[in-house]
Amino acid sequence: MCRTTDLRQAVLARNDDSARALRAELAARGTVAVNLLSSPGSGKTALLEAELALARAREVPVAALTADLATENDARRLARTGVPVQQVCTDGLCHLEAVMLRGYLAGWLPADTRVLFVENVGNLVCPAVYDLGETLRVTLAAVTEGEDKPLKYPTAFGLAQLVMVTKTDLAAAVGFDEDAFLGNVARVNPGVDVVFTSAREGRGVGTLLERALAVRDGAAAHRPVMAAAQAAPGYSPGGPLGESGAHAHSAPHPATAAGAGPRPHHEHEHEHGHGHGHGHPMVDRL
Amino acid sequence: MHEMSIAAAVVDQVERAAREQGFTAVATVRLDVGELAGVVPRALDFCFSLVCEGTALEGATLTTRSVRARARCAGCAVEWYAGMPPDLGCPGCGGGTRVELLTGRELRIRGVEWAEGPLPAQG
Ligand SMILES: Nc1nc2c(ncn2[C@@H]2O[C@H](COP(=O)(O)OP(=O)(O)OP(=O)(O)O)[C@@H](O)[C@H]2O)c(=O)[nH]1
Ligand SMILES: [Mg+2]
Ligand SMILES: [Zn+2]
């Protein structure tokens, strides 16, 4: 008979703790962090260049940190605006984590910074999982990427507090279906604002800075449905109905909700593993 | 592939628990992974075996339980499986302001099954 321990620990507990601490630290000194997520090449740097230049013209103290797998190209581009810029080379790591960010800010971030823009590694999968201590999380998608990106990357778009569409100057050329995109965003993140921008034409430039400053001054940022479960203190994974959420990940899902109304909860369970664990009876059922 | 970082976080936490509780070897680690957690269980499995090498978890089995995303609208008292890709708009009122995600974002170590520790080294 094996001995078992119920741990019930969030795997990302340490990152989440660091993120919470960093958010509080930044807030105490009057800085809000904005975490920018998108696939590679969506136009994060181009939009940031415009926002930083605008902030500089308005004499709003801002700073930017940009993370890339390699090269300092983005930092060079951003630094031309004259605001403090820090390049982070992740050396192959696909995302930033809160402790890393905190380490890079120490001794660098100017004390009077009101908005810290963080350009995450171009990637819609991994960075979505890590809270960096931001107060505003922004997910961007270029019109050239297609309307279905919110459905293909539900975690990235579902956790966004603001969605920005970029490169709208190319919308006609690629036949971008705005309504389809908005519908897909609303499905994974009902209520989130979607802002249309073109760094090329200057459309929507300034919105990001204004939203960030508003949040800094106490305006409530959008609260995504998907973020709630994660944030809820002391939640139990089974929810009020116990374990009914557990199922085999290979099992087909019933057609999705629209118009389907409430459904009975089936209890499926499947242990996915390798080695001798397969088929072991569950010792520590919650 | 952030599953490597996730696997490392799991190993780190289990090793910590092992030290605290005086165990030296691990048979099984049980995880809950919500379908909206942003983690691919199969990739995690693969990374887990790599990260375990040379730790107290070497040879341990990772058992992953997938948790479906379930949402509820407080306004309509309607509850539904969000599906994948998730539909988080309320099927009753069409809105999202009172929608709550009940499950589906878990990324959690449920428990650990300890193995007997190795025999003390001879000489
Ligand atoms: N037409 C058009 N092109 C744009 C716009 N914004 C960016 N681009 C182009 O898109 C390409 C990628 O832009 P970046 O700003 O480097 O994108 P990024 O998201 O920072 O890329 P990574 O940091 O590598 O992930 C460049 O060739 C830009 O010139 C825009 O508004 N319109
Ligand atoms: Mg860039
Ligand atoms: Zn409703």
Image (tube, rainbow, N blue to C red):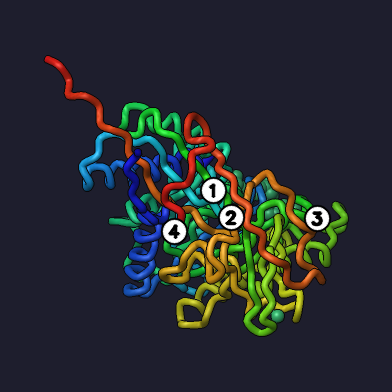
Q: Pointer 4 and pointer 2: residues touching (CB < 8 Å)?
A: no
Q: Is residue A205 above or below residue A49?
A: below
Q: Which residue is mark 1?
A: B65
Q: CA distance from mark 1 to mark 4?
A: 27 Å
Residue A132 numbered tag: 4
Label 1 crowd (10 A; few <14 / some 14-19 / many >=20): many
Query: Looking at this view, is A260 or A211 the one in front?
Result: A260
Q: Position of residue A55 (x, y in %)?
A: 52, 69
- Chain ID at mark 4: A
Q: Quadrant of residue B54?
A: top left
Q: Which numbered disc, 1 or 3, marks the residue closer to the eye?
A: 1
The quarter of the displayed image where residue B91 is located: bottom right
What's the CA distance linking mark 2 and mark 1? 7 Å
At numbered mark 2, what does the secondary structure look like: helix, strand or loop? strand
The three-letter amino acid code for the residue at tag 2 is Ala
Residue drawn at x 35%, y 59% as measured from the top left: A18
Q: Report the side of B78 relative to B14 (left or right).
A: right
Residue A20, relative to residue B25: is it above or below? below
Helix, strand or loop for disc 4: loop
- Mark 3, other Cα within 10 Å: few <14 / some 14–19 / many ≥20: some
Residue A170 numbered mark, or none: 3
**Looking at the image, which residue is at 38% across and 65% down?**
A20
Badge 2 and badge 3 in a common chain: yes
Whether the residues at callouts 2 and 1 have beta carbons within 8 Å, the answer is yes
- Do the residues marked 3 and 4 share a common chain? yes
Q: Is residue A27 left or right of residue A258?
A: left
